Amino acid sequence: EPEVTQTPSHQVTQMGQEVILRCVPISNHLYFYWYRQILGQKVEFLVSFYNNEISEKSEIFDDQFSVERPDGSNFTLKIRSTKLEDSAMYFCASSGQGNEQFFGPGTRLTVL
Amino acid sequence: GQNIDQPTEMTATEGAIVQINCTYQTSGFNGLFWYQQHAGEAPTFLSYNVLDGLEEKGRFSSFLSRSKGYSYLLLKELQMKDSASYLCAVRDRNTGGFKTIFGAGTRLFVKA
């Protein structure tokens, strides 16, 4: 069964460093999303992406964040200068023509 | 703004039925999702409602009343593996596109 994959599973970085989180959505899906979940808190929407551009973003998704689909398979989230409060689980999701969003296993980001 | 309320925790007995309620307020309602999330894992899709009424899928059913801003998830024949958090999420349409807003989740404990 096709699934969304994410790498790395765990990323540790120093405050102020740039990180790139990678996702491979399900191959025939057209809509891509990033969410984050701070430990013990709710899942928060960051951004949705369709047709090679951002279709919606939340207040969290400020100038420090960017997304890219560099080729036909990868979908990346970049955080330019990480802060302690960026420590969270980051989930990528994708959907096709239907409404079901398939989530990847997540990348746990720890900012020291 | 958007607001989603659901109970923090519920406990039920194996084999029983449990109903998890969700109320929401949103400006551009475009559907309501229920997800299951086991600790340390990604959310997995359970159901989607956009029209009023009941959607049934095996042991899980979901109900929506748009006029009341209300949904519930019904789980029948509870099993121990159903112990998890259940996330109510609303898809909200803005001028640019869609964003999915999650509630804080209801942690369900199934006891023998």
Image: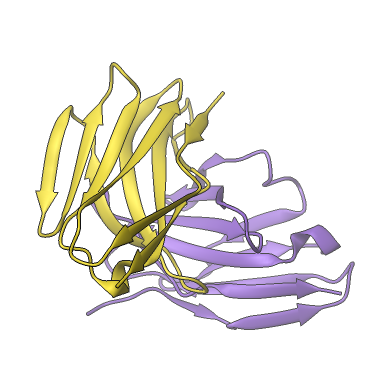
Chain colours: A purple, B yellow
Residue A39, relative to residue B80: is it above or below? above
Q: Nearer the viewer, residue A34 or B55?
A: B55
A58 to the left or right of B64: right
Quadrant where the C terminus of chain A lies? Answer: bottom right
Q: Residue at x 18, y 29 (%)?
A: B51
What count of labels does the image hold?
0
Horizontal and vertical percent for residue A53? 50, 48
Residue at the far top in the pictured view: B67
Q: Residue at x 45, y 68 (%)?
A: B42
Residue B105, relative to residue A75: is it above or below? above
Q: Nearer the viewer, residue B14 or A21?
A: B14
Horizontal and vertical percent for residue B8? 51, 47
Give the quadrant of residue A73. Answer: bottom left
Quadrant where the N terminus of chain A lies? Answer: bottom left
B76 to the left or right of B71: left
Q: Residue at x 39, y 37 (%)?
A: B91
Report whether residue A83 is seen. no
Q: Residue at x 60, y 59 (%)?
A: A37
B82 to the left or right of B93: left
Residue A45, relative to residue A37: is it above or below? above
Give the quadrant of residue A19. Answer: bottom right
Residue A34, relative to residue A105: is it above or below? above
Report whether residue A53 is seen. yes
Horizontal and vertical percent for residue A24? 44, 74
Horizontal and vertical percent for residue B99? 47, 40
